[in-house]
Image: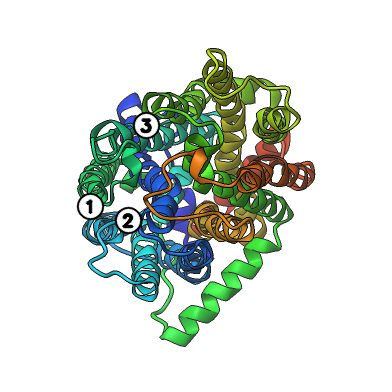
Amino acid sequence: MQSVAALILPRLEKLSFNLKLAFGIGQLAEGLKAGALGTFLFFYYNQVLGLSGTLTGLAVSTALVVDAVVDPLIGSLSDHWRSKYGRRHPFMYASILPLAICFFLLFAPPVRGEWALFVWLVVFTNLARISISLYFVPHQALGAEMSTDFTERSALVGYRVFFSVLGGFAATIIGFQFFFAPTPEFSNGQLNAGAYAPFAATLALLMAIAIFWSTWGTRSVIPFLPKATPDASVGALAFLIRVLRDMVTALRCGSFAWLFSGVLVIFVMIGVNTALDLYMYTYFWELTHGQIVALATAYPLGLMLGALVAPALQRRYGKRWALLFGTITWGVLQVLPIMLRLLGWFPENGSDILLPLLIGMRVLQGAGAVQANVAFGSAVADVCDEHELQSGKRQEGIFFSAISFSSTCAVGGGSLIAGLGLDLIDWPRGAKILSAADVPADAIFGLGVIYGPVVASLALLTMWCYSHYRLTRERHTEILAALARRRDVLAAADH
């Protein structure tokens, strides 16, 4: 049970711009990581280094198993952490150095040979994921603790999503413009194996700066945050039992169970597409370097534009509407150009209208999809209040470890499915596969089927899950009122 002091401690409701900026900019690190791993990691190991699609996907997907254990451990540990620096900030500081080192080594393997590459990818994918979770889980929990206001939370998540997308956008631009530009030796710069290590070093430095900025910049809220329950020290076995108990309690919360189920499905599907983006740009649409840069930045641009208006839209229409609208928008615009091409009703490759059409669809897709992204993060924060009313505990760490795990599903599960799919259609690999002319027509057709209709159809399952979410603004207001009454009673008893 929370201590009385923790329950009556006031939290900031209206947050300053500088505080929101410092919190949001920390998500730049996650965006840089997600952009690099989602866009370049699978392509680098599979197409450039020659590791089979199945082994590449299997190696990256091992992070699913590790994160399924590590994320709740970090969440529970930070929930119960007691220090003068609060529950979250010590973990955020501790993540900086190991993340920078492991991320760099992930893109700089000193080994060659299929099994050596497989082992290296397994080890450093997981070390990098653990390092980012050490920051990401407490950082998300911190956002839920900074305000209990229904609308202010959406604004705070809007900042977070904006900088997350900006990080992915930056990873794409930095990669294509500065490291993977065409050279006399590599007309497709993304096939240049020597460019990946300096690319990773640059992003690792930027991630370290963003995490330090966010951690240092939000230190002023520590006195206003809930404090950990003064539990007695427990051994390793008791701690694991406590984590399992916390996880079971969280999953018993109906609102959270539906949210978590929905986001797992859609994130895996997005992960498949992200892993295959470079294949689609290079071989399916046959885009030039400049066109790839333009199209690769269209979706992040849509996400950033959509994030700016997401709080206002959710204030008007609610979070459940945003979850459903974002999901259906993503699915429809994902499948539409692929199906039209496969049916022969889309402009041919090389036509003047092809790129503007693709860019327009991707911008709209991002602007729509981000409504679900913002609503999900804000809704989980509301669920934490519902859980506190039911259990008497503040356990943001456990709940937001789910977001970290869903992010892993996007990279790990998506990469595994993408790898299996590429091997299933006998996709040729190696740096000498320069254009669509080097790929059988059946393989290109299969790539389009996987990337479009197969993946997008599963958005229907996500919509079904989200349709069961029932925590409205009115119900949340009732929860906050009930919590306030409980705090008043405990405060009176304490006196």
Q: Mark 1 or mark 2, which is nearer to you?
A: 1
Q: Are marks 1 and 3 in contact (CB under 8 Å)?
A: no
Give me the disc on residue 20.
3
Please, what secondary structure does the residue beneath circle 2 have? loop
Sequence-wise, the earlier of marks 1 and 3 is 3
Count neighbours of disc 2 (C-alpha within 10 A) and say few if under 14, some if 14 to 19, many if 20 or more.
Answer: many
> Which residue sits at x=73%, y=22%?
345
Q: How far apart are marks 1 and 3 (CA)?
A: 33 Å
Please, what secondary structure does the residue beneath circle 3 have? helix
Q: What residue type is labelled 1?
A: Ala
Residue 62 picture location, percent across and down:
49, 69
Where on the picture, by quarter, is residue 114?
bottom left
Q: Which amino acid does label 2 sit on?
A: Gly
Q: Mark 3 or mark 2, which is nearer to you?
A: 3
Residue 149 picture location, percent across and down:
54, 33
Q: What residue type is labelled 3?
A: Lys
Q: Mark 1 or mark 3, which is nearer to you?
A: 1
Please, what secondary structure does the residue beneath circle 1 have? helix
> Which residue sits at x=47%, y=70%?
66
Q: How far apart are marks 1 and 2 (CA)?
A: 36 Å
Q: Name the residue under label 2.
A: 86
- Can residue 331 be seen in the rendering of this structure? yes
Front-most of 122 and 190?
A: 190
Where on the picture, by quarter, is residue 261?
bottom right
Give me the disc on residue 197.
1
Sequence-wise, the earlier of marks 1 and 2 is 2
Residue 229 picture location, percent across and down:
45, 66
Residue 20 picture location, percent across and down:
37, 31
Q: How far apart are marks 3 and 2 (CA)?
A: 18 Å
